[in-house]
């Protein structure tokens, strides 16, 4: 009886694993295996390399703020981006549906850029490498499309960011 019960449990477990396998995250390989695996949510091929390349445009001594919505970006995404952006400080703002900041970690350095992660049909067509301008305060500043929903907005020494959730 114990053998039959063991075989039945293994069969059910295997069937469940086979059913859920396509839903599990795919493991990345290579030097950035860990960070690439955690950054799959960004939907960018080789996200660690893409982020490092994009972040080279931020001047030394200036910080970066990662802006997202609570339901779409786990806190671990911010932590991995912070590691990749070193030595830049990386702040974190979670914007609620009503456009207010629900959770925020501000950097102490001057914010030179915003990494904006937006999901949904309105943002799914951000062309990689595109350079649209974004209206910040009273001026237009350049940006760079990194992925279908990820945009790096680069300010200047005098840029003031009125609200990260309104970008």
Image (cartoon, rainbow, N blue to C red):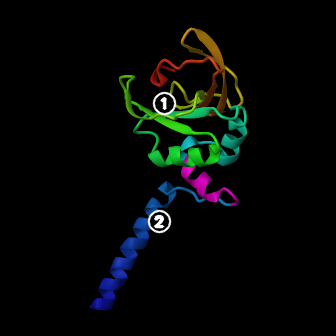
Find the residue positioned furthest to the top: 138
Q: Are marks 2 and 1 in contact (CB under 8 Å)?
A: no
Q: Is residue 160 above or below residue 72?
A: above
Towards the viewer: 12 or 162: 162
Q: Is residue 123 above or below residue 50?
A: above
Main secondary structure found in the magenta portion: helix
Circle 2 residues within 10 Å: few <14, some 14–19, many ≥20: few
- Write the residue at 39% across / 72% down: 13
Secondary structure at badge 1 equals loop
Towards the viewer: 151 or 119: 151
Question: Residue 110 vs residue 24: left or right?
Answer: right
Q: Which mark is residue 120?
A: 1
Quadrant of image for the N terminus: bottom left
Circle 1 residues within 10 Å: few <14, some 14–19, many ≥20: few
- Quarter assignment of residue 151: top right
Closer to the chain start, of discs 2 and 1, is: 2
Image spot of residue 144 (x, y percent)? 67, 27
Is residue 117 located in the magenta-colored stretch of the structure? Answer: no
Image spot of residue 31 (x, y percent)? 70, 59
Image spot of residue 142 (x, y percent)? 67, 20
Q: Is residue 114 above or below residue 9?
A: above
Residue pointed to by mark 2 = 18
Secondary structure at badge 2 equals helix
Q: Which residues are magenta?
A: 30-40
Q: Nearer the viewer, mark 2 or mark 1?
A: 1
- State the separation of the CA atoms marked 2 and 1: 30 Å
Is residue 38 located in the magenta-colored stretch of the structure? Answer: yes
- Write the residue at 56% across / 49% down: 80
Image spot of residue 85 (x, y percent)? 63, 43
């Amino acid at each position: 009886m114990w053998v039959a019960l063991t075989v039945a449990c293994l069969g059910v477990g295997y069937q469940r694993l086979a059913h859920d396998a396509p839903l599990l995250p795919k493991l990345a390989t290579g030097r950035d295996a860990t960070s690439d695996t955690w950054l799959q949510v960004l939907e960018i091929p080789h996200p660690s390399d893409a982020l490092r390349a994009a972040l080279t445009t931020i001047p030394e001594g200036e910080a970066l703020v990662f802006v997202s919505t609570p339901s779409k970006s786990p806190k671990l995404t911010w932590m991995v981006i912070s590691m990749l952006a070193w030595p830049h400080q990386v702040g974190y703002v979670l914007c609620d549906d009503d456009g207010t900041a629900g959770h925020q970690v501000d950097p102490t350095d001057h914010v030179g850029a915003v990494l904006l992660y937006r999901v949904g049909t309105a943002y799914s067509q951000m062309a990689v490498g595109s350079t649209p301008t974004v209206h910040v305060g009273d001026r237009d500043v350049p940006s760079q499309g990194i992925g279908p929903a990820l945009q790096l907005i680069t300010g200047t020494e005098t840029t003031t960011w009125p609200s990260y959730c309104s970008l």
